[in-house]
Image: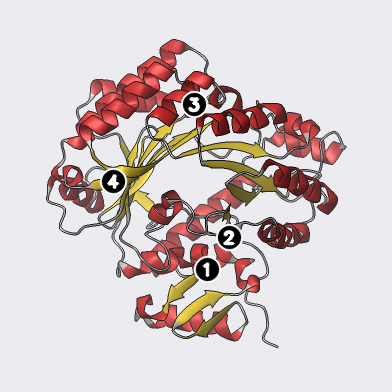
Amino acid sequence: MSAPMYQDLTPVTHHFYPLQKYSDPADPPYQHFLNTLRGPKLQATDNMIYLHIPYCEKRCTFCPFHVRVKRSPEVYERYVLALEKEIAAVSRYRYVREMTFTAVYFGGGSPSLLTVDQIRRLYDALRRSFDIAPDAEWTFEGEPAGLSDPALLGYLGEQGTKRISYGIQTFDEELRQRLNIAATVQDALTTMERARAVGFQDVNVDMMYYLPGQTMADLERDLTELAACDFDSVDYYYMSYYAMPKSAFLGMEKGTYPKKPPAELRMEMGRYVRERMVQLGYHQVTDHVFAKNPAGSHYYRILWGGGFGEHNAETLALGASARGYLNGQSYANILAPDPYVEHIEQRDTLPLYKVSGLLDDARNRGMVFFPKFFQVPESRVPGDPNTRILLDNLIEAGYATLRDGLISLTEKGKDWIPNITVDLFEHEQRMINDAWVADLDSHYSNRVTL
């Protein structure tokens, strides 16, 4: 039997590639990105708009995202005005004008914190400024207490919004309170009931495992509760402890806060989630997404290049900390909401924070994301020797198979998707990743050794 290729799960999961590195407008990749937007779009691609609302009712203790807890109507209105201005500015670029969008995603944060009138203005601004296909998949994310508002659900339904998405994470009310989750389980169930009454056919929820103090029996209780709800799709993540505050880790040491489960339990829980979700009638459409519809949503497919080794699908990003990918480069907007708004108000330039360089071989993006979809046709594998050697090693060690021209991850390979993803990076991208991981390890070394 071959020796295992991996011992420890890499701590960073990547959703955008190439990795963003350049923040100085004088950097050639930065200028190349802007020049791309000014020029024509030379290749037809499948495209999505991602619009970010960076505010939440409360901040969950595990949240790694750039969100703010603010309840001032003035703050929300100022942000919506900035978004409207950014939408208009971005739409003036020729490259963007020549794009047709087949998906639109309102993410956060909690977009449901906005008023229905503000949401209507954003829907109208997007439709006025961009070429959005009549049958595009619109997804609206929210926090259950706000998303259950009948007026909001009614408006979203009238506008042809196909999916709504919100977080549950766990049905354990005591643990939910410890994790500072704003909504109750009843809020989540009420949202589902009202969404069905409006006619939504795709209700998605987020769930998490490997939570503080969680046992296999606790996980099974969550899965049993989940089965009774009959959601259309579920994003089921393992919890990363990098975002947890120091106070939580001190509580783990003192016995006043549930401890992080043993490291080996994360892998066991992940396998159990995959097995049970399939038993419950779901298809595993990507590494963490389970759906009743085997095709899944357009959102994740476009976000990760098109799926199954494709690499050309593009994402236009709008809002503070939003990330996108256009013409070979990924990019991020200014992270914090206040500086983002101030930039929009004071300058006539895009609110860029960082951009990536170009890959040596654009097909590498499709390979990097293929593990998320578990399969790639051998015909889409780039010809560089490093990729071929890695794939051969995965096959030899039992992490993948090659049959009838299709490379597929085994269940053993699915355990190690974050590691396989990073191993498929081009050399320069791997160097950027390793520097990020070193910074994280240094910053959180006093928190993650429990």
Q: Which residue is mark 2?
A: 284
Say what amino acid the circle numbered 4 marks.
Phe
Which secondary structure lies at badge 2?
strand
Q: Nearer the viewer, residue 445 or 64?
A: 64
Residue under the point 45% across and 12% down: 73
Position of the N terminus by quadrant? bottom right
Residue under the point 44% across and 30% down: 157
The percent coordinates of residue 61 (x first, y second) are: 66, 34
Work out whether 9 lies above or below 337. below
Q: Which residue is mark 3?
A: 153
Marks 4 & 2, CB-CB < 8 Å contact: no
Marks 2 & 1, CB-CB < 8 Å contact: yes
Residue under the point 70% across and 62% down: 275
Mark before the other along the chain sequence, 1 or 4: 4
Q: Which residue is mark 1?
A: 374
Marks 3 & 4, CB-CB < 8 Å contact: no
Disc 1 residue crowd, few under 14, some 14–19, many 20+, Cα 10 Å: many
Q: Is residue 342 visible?
A: no
Q: Is residue 17 visible?
A: yes
User: Picture quarter containing residue 177?
Assistant: top right
Disc 3 residue crowd, few under 14, some 14–19, many 20+, Cα 10 Å: many
Mark before the other along the chain sequence, 3 or 2: 3
The CA span between labels 3 and 4 is: 23 Å
Q: Which residue is mark 4?
A: 101
Mark before the other along the chain sequence, 4 or 2: 4
